[in-house]
Each structure stands twice: as structure tokens, then as C-alpha cells.
Image (tube, helix red, strand yellow):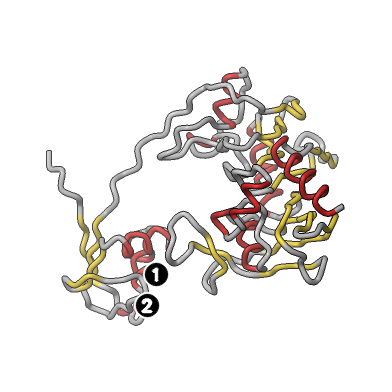
């Protein structure tokens, strides 16, 4: 069997005249725009035999050649106990947990650490079979480096209704973030589109062609060099709070990926961003009643906050 990568070549339809390469690939080959851009950036796209970048423009009749990515390998769910994961609420339809730092919501290629799904499986929980095989029951996620509240669907009804609430933005998702400096104004809204960072695959950024993203923030407490904020998300983009606060020039303390001061992070003993999903409210899928849950700060975040408070006295 040949191990050479498969390539596909198609003529560019006249209707795509002048389109960017990544947009044309997405339309012609069925990839997402993000995946199409990744293929172009990795040198796997050519036009009439010449390498093409994602921002190049295509012309009707040109031959667009794409080296197809290998089909994804199935991701296995490993039942493994998660130290520090707290069950906040449990009923027939759902389970609410407080996720510790360093744990992913579900398995993914390249991730070898523990997951919420694996932790629930190890504890004997039965969760919904809806959704992709590796993320069944997961209706929303938290970054590996973010701690706090998550809800996981146990019944198929709960999965459908919770996903709908997240999609319609009726879920009350509240975070507390310790950010550098003092936002001006002290309460406000950041409305800026977020998409893949143009130069770093692992990062996200405020870019014109990104997806609409809205973050509301209010000051809880001001310190000498930092501010504790209450943050409500209107949308739920990957790294949204971290990206928005960094773009606002007030990165989360400890968030070295998005520009936090490494000296301050080290002094506070932080190895991750100071960000915690502190409150989660939604309509319960069984009867529509509004329910709310809260989670105390993780120990490393509380310690850092105590030090910042003492420094401000």
C-alpha cells in the first residue's frame, strides 16, 4: 500500500474568481476555513504547480492542488480518576463539576493528560451518547489551564436542550479574572472578533475576519498593580477572555501566552492564567426551572490573590 500523501486537483470554477485561496479550498474541498488556511500555511497547496499562500487570489480555470490531510485517528476515552475534580451537583439529566487546572474537557489528538469525560467514567457516571464519540455529553468546554464550573449532559434530552441554551446565549457564564493594571473604564464591554492567530497556530487573536465575540466585565476589587474582574461572556470563543483582556492591554495575571508579566507570575507562584469559572446558571432541562451553581477559587488562585491583596495594604 502506498504511503505517499493523497493529492486532489480541481479546476477553479469561474464563480470563485478573485477569492482567497483558503476560501476557495473551503468551498471546493469541503474543509473549514481554518483548516484550509492551515493547509496553505504548511505548503500543501499549489495553483498551476506553484506554491500558494492562504491570502493569494485564485482565477477561474486555474488548477488548484491540495495535499489532503491524513484521516483523523479515533480518540480513545480512558477512564482515569481526576484528582481535585469536585461534583457540585448530580441528577438524572446532568452533572455539574468544578474542573481543576490541567484537565481537558475531553480527549483530543496529542493530549495525554486526564479529561473530564475520563474522570466521570472512572467514577461510574453514565453520560449522554450524543455528540462526537470523544466528547459525548460535553456541551461546553473550559481551557486546560482554566479551572471552575462545567455542566455535562447525562441524558439525551439534557444534551439537546443544554446545547440549545448555549447556542441561544441564555446560559449565564460568569468568570473571575485577575488582570494586570486597571481597566479604563472600570466596567465595560469588549466587542471584537476573534480568530486564529495569523502567526501562531496555538494562539487566537482579535482579527477583522474573526467570529463575533463579546465580553462584559465589571470591577470587583482594585489592587496596586492588578484588578479582580467579574466577567460575563455573551459568546464562547476559544480563549475569549484571555484574548480580549490581552487586546485590551490587561492580560490575565499568569497568562504568559498572551503577554502577562513573567516576573509577577513567578512571584505569585502562578504557572497558569488567573481565571476561574465561578458561576453557571441555566434552565434545567427536566422542567425549565432556573438553576445556578458556584465554585470557590482554586488554591493556587486564592494564594496569588492573597499575595496581591497584602502587597496593596
Q: CA distance from mark 1 to mark 2?
A: 6 Å
Counting other residues with Cα less than 10 Å from the Cα at mark 2, is it few (<14), some (14-19), or many (20 or more)? some
Disc 1 + disc 2, Cβ < 8 Å: yes
Q: Is residue 157 among the parts visible in the rendering? A: no
196 in relation to 86, above or below: below
Residue 232: % across, % down: 76, 56
Q: Which mark is residue 19?
A: 2
Q: Is residue 138 above or below residue 93?
A: below
What count of labels does the image hold? 2
Q: Nearer the viewer, residue 183 or 286?
A: 183
**What numbered label is drawn on residue 23?**
1
Measured as percent of width and height from the top left, residue 169 is found at 72, 55
Q: Secondary structure at mark 1?
A: helix
Instruction: Give the side of residue 216 with respect to residue 290, left or right.
Output: left
Residue at 22% x, 70% y is 51
Q: Is residue 90 visible?
A: yes
Q: Secondary structure at mark 2?
A: loop
Is 176 placed left or right of 54 in the picture?
Answer: right
Residue at position x 72%, y 33% in the image: 96
Characterize the local packing of mark 1: few (<14), some (14-19) or many (20 or more) Cα atoms within 10 angstroms.
many
Amino acid at each position: 500500500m502506498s504511503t505517499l500523501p493523497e493529492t486532489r486537483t480541481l479546476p477553479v470554477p469561474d464563480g470563485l474568481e478573485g477569492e482567497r485561496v483558503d476560501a476557495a479550498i473551503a468551498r471546493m474541498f469541503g474543509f473549514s476555513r481554518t483548516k484550509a488556511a492551515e493547509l496553505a500555511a504548511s505548503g500543501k497547496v499549489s495553483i498551476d504547480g506553484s506554491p500558494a499562500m492562504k491570502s493569494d487570489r485564485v482565477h477561474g480555470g486555474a488548477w488548484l492542488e491540495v495535499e489532503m490531510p491524513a484521516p483523523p485517528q479515533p480518540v480513545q476515552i480512558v477512564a482515569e480518576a481526576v484528582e481535585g475534580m469536585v461534583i457540585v451537583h448530580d441528577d438524572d439529566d446532568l452533572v455539574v463539576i468544578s474542573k481543576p487546572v490541567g484537565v481537558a474537557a475531553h480527549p483530543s489528538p496529542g493530549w495525554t493528560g486526564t479529561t473530564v469525560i475520563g474522570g466521570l467514567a472512572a467514577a461510574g457516571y453514565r453520560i449522554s451518547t450524543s455528540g462526537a464519540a470523544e466528547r459525548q455529553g460535553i456541551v461546553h468546554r473550559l481551557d486546560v489551564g482554566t479551572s471552575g464550573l462545567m455542566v455535562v449532559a447525562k441524558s439525551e434530552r439534557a444534551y439537546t436542550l443544554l446545547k440549545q441554551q448555549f447556542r441561544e446565549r441564555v446560559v449565564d457564564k460568569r468568570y473571575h479574572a485577575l488582570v494586570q493594571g486597571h481597566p479604563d473604564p472600570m466596567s465595560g464591554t469588549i466587542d471584537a472578533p476573534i480568530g486564529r492567530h495569523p502567526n501562531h497556530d496555538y494562539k487566537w487573536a482579535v482579527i477583522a475576519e474573526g467570529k463575533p465575540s463579546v465580553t462584559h466585565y465589571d470591577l470587583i476589587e482594585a489592587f496596586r498593580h492588578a484588578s479582580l474582574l467579574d466577567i460575563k461572556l455573551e459568546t464562547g470563543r476559544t480563549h475569549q477572555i484571555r484574548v480580549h483582556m490581552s487586546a485590551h492591554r490587561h492580560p490575565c495575571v499568569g497568562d504568559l501566552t498572551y503577554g502577562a508579566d513573567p516576573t509577577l507570575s513567578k512571584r505569585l507562584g502562578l504557572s497558569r492564567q488567573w481565571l476561574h469559572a465561578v458561576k453557571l446558571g441555566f434552565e434545567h432541562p427536566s422542567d425549565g426551572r432556573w438553576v445556578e451553581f458556584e465554585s470557590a477559587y482554586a488554591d493556587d488562585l486564592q494564594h496569588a490573590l492573597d499575595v496581591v491583596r497584602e502587597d496593596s495594604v
